[in-house]
Amino acid sequence: MHSGGHTRRMLLKGVSAGALLSALSPAAARIRMTGSARIEALIAGMSLAEKAGQLSIYSDPVRAYGAVVNPGVVTQGLTEIKARIARGEMVGLFNGVGVALGRALQKVAVEQSRTGIPLIFAADVIHGCRTIFPIPLGEAASFDLDLAERTARAAALEASALGVHWTFAPMVDVARDERWGRVAEGAGEDPWLGEMFARARVRGFQGTDLRDPTRVLACPKHFAAYGAVQGGMEYNTADISDTTLWQVHLPPFKAAFGAGALSTMASFNDIAGVPSTANHHLLTEILRDEWGFKGVVVSDYTSEQEVVAHGYAADERDAVVKSLTAGCDISMQSGLYYKHLPELVQSGQVPIAVVDRAVRRVLEVKQALGLFENPYRSLDPARQVNDIRRPETVALAREAGRKSVVLLRNEGNLLPLAKTATIALIGPAISDRADLPGPWAVFPDVASHVTIEEGFRAAMGSHGALHVARGCDYEAPIEGGIASAVAAAMACDVVVLVAGESAGMSGEAQARVDIGIPPAQLALAEAIAATGKPLVVVLRHGRALALTGAVRNAPAILASWFLGSETGHALADLVFGDAAPQGRLPVSFPQSSGQEPFYYNHRSTGRPQTSDEKDYKARYREVTNAPLYPFGHGLTYAAVVYGETMAKGPLVRDGRMIVWATVANTGNRPCHEVAQLYLHARVASVTQPVRVLRGIRHLDLAPGQVVTVSFDVTEADLAYVHQDLRSFADPGLFDVWIAPSAQGGTSATFAMTD
């Protein structure tokens, strides 16, 4: 009926794009128009209500997983949600999965809505979908960027098989206060490591072509400086200098956008009194004008509404004006954009050009995903069966789990254990399948998860004996628990005590004033230690912990984070020596909770503590400034010795210089070592950190093997943010270390000259 010739005649006669859109069926319009022409035609033909709908996303009320991780999810029936989609009231839905209903909802959008614009389906796929990988902080402990890219790829494969187009990940906030629960979602305290993992995870999610139906759109979050909330308190304010913002908190975002991320999520916090969601300087002047970002900005869950509670907007309407004009394109969950934008435009308080600009960004992202050409992409029933928990994905989860574990201590080479031993496995988490996914795992296949007890039994087979006892709950004693645990310990050669946090103690809204082991578990640990049996402590946690008592003093300690689906097998691989420990701490372990915020790359004060001096130095009365375990720390099952760092200088601006050191495995077992490059500017116009990480090398060393590891150093490695916010290096003297941690190694000195 609407032939190509008919369409061309209408254009030649000067018919408007809006009239053309009305004359064509939505399907015909999609077929006959492409690229910017299609988008401009859609914008020209949309009503204000339809435009506001393209700027509004809601938690999926039908396939309702959102209630697991979000507050105040309003349940709506299928009939109501289909009617809203048909009226064009939403850009898409989030945290709902399932192909059959996803296809049905998409069919309503493309065949019943007036514009025919497809929905976008989003989800919080933070560290896996059905198959769960280690929490991002745990995976960051691998210091393995290839691993991070591969797990993000696998997560995208499963998520897209369940109908997801857009993941609200990766979280790239630099977090320096372990009291903050969302430390679990990021890559730790170091900006450089954060940049590296941001790039890797975006590449893993998106690949090279977003139209690939097995890929998902990445959404680096939370823009910006959410990791700087005061006191580590969730949703709190961030009051930081511009140099700290630019040198610490913005680089991982810029790296993620450089890797191709086409969306970002505004953060809940304010910065210097301006909430991020309504921060024009942040969302427009920096993100778009300076960095050239072309994608969309989505609010965090109702954060555009919360600028009223911040005291930055007078009411909901004012919040919409300030958020949209600042550069926040999509309203999440509150519905405020849909509710107020039409009237705000009609009254002249919001220019229609501002609305059209945001809608254009949204449609361009949908176009980049290929949704106009293939609205049913990632909604393939066959893929929902074939691409979920593939054997290679499960194997990857096990690999990621064992590479994420950090061996903190191993006195007397207690680890690895013999499979022929009689072992007491004790702790509240040993058989708790439901807790295995850890925080922010929205869609886990819990039934398939491998508990610690199951992993140990599978590894030991019939060779040894395993006695298990829960001992206590995560935060409370249980009747007779300690007595049964002590009895199990007394009957065995060695004890493996699994202690730390439950999944519910980490993640969003789980800020802690005391980041130690809960008292009930400490009492259990003391009772076990009193038996005199050799003690291995396995920590489960979503942050660095302040260890005390018997846990701190255990001869062998493993930091295992939350390892996901293959927890039991991954831990058993390491405990019994089938794999060599690889993990390195992405966060510093303090001696006490009161030291937080605590991080290795702090600036030097005018009165630094350089020895055991106590008076009139920058330190607390009770502890030194040293960490219990430093950033980058991680042992192997062999002794590793670093030679002196050597530097062949000077470094000429725009040139490069080589630094090197020998690394030797002096033990009798093969090991995996992670050599780290650190730098320090002796003098700068803005005081600089005592060390900054600038490189990592993974080394597989046979017993007795000695290798020379080298790094190139360039001016970019020495650059820092000056007071005018330009980043460059000053000529002068620099210290350099090739070291096993942020506190190890011997330094060399070199000069950079113009």
Image (cartoon, grey):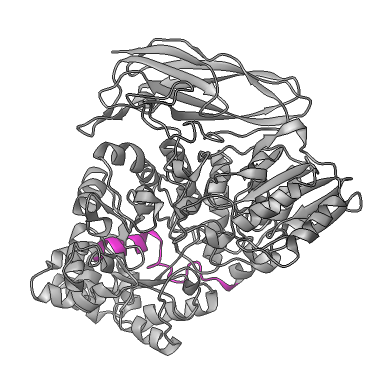
Is 135 magenta? The answer is no
Give the image location of residue 746, x and y in percent.
53, 17
Q: What's the residue at 40%, 85% (across, down)?
A: 82
Q: Nearer the viewer, residue 449 or 156?
A: 449
Q: What's the residue at 58%, 33% (across, down)?
A: 633
Residue at the left extreme?
348
Quarter of the view holding residue 448? bottom right
Give the image location of residue 209, x and y in percent.
44, 53
Give the image location of residue 300, x and y in percent.
35, 63
Residue at the bottom extreme?
79
Give the image location of residue 345, x and y in percent.
13, 73
Vertical comparison of 645 with 601: above or below: above
Quarter of the view holding residue 584? top right
Locate residue 525 relative to residue 128 in the image: left or right.
right
Q: Number of numbered discs present?
A: 0
Is 364 magenta? The answer is yes
Vertical comparison of 221 with 603: above or below: below
Locate residue 347 relative to residue 648 in the image: left or right.
left
Q: Which of 657 and 275 is in front in this view?
A: 275
Quarter of the figure that contains the N terminus: bottom left
Quarter of the figure that contains the C terminus: top left
Span colored in magenta: 359-381
Q: Can residue 388 be seen at all in this image of the molecule?
A: no
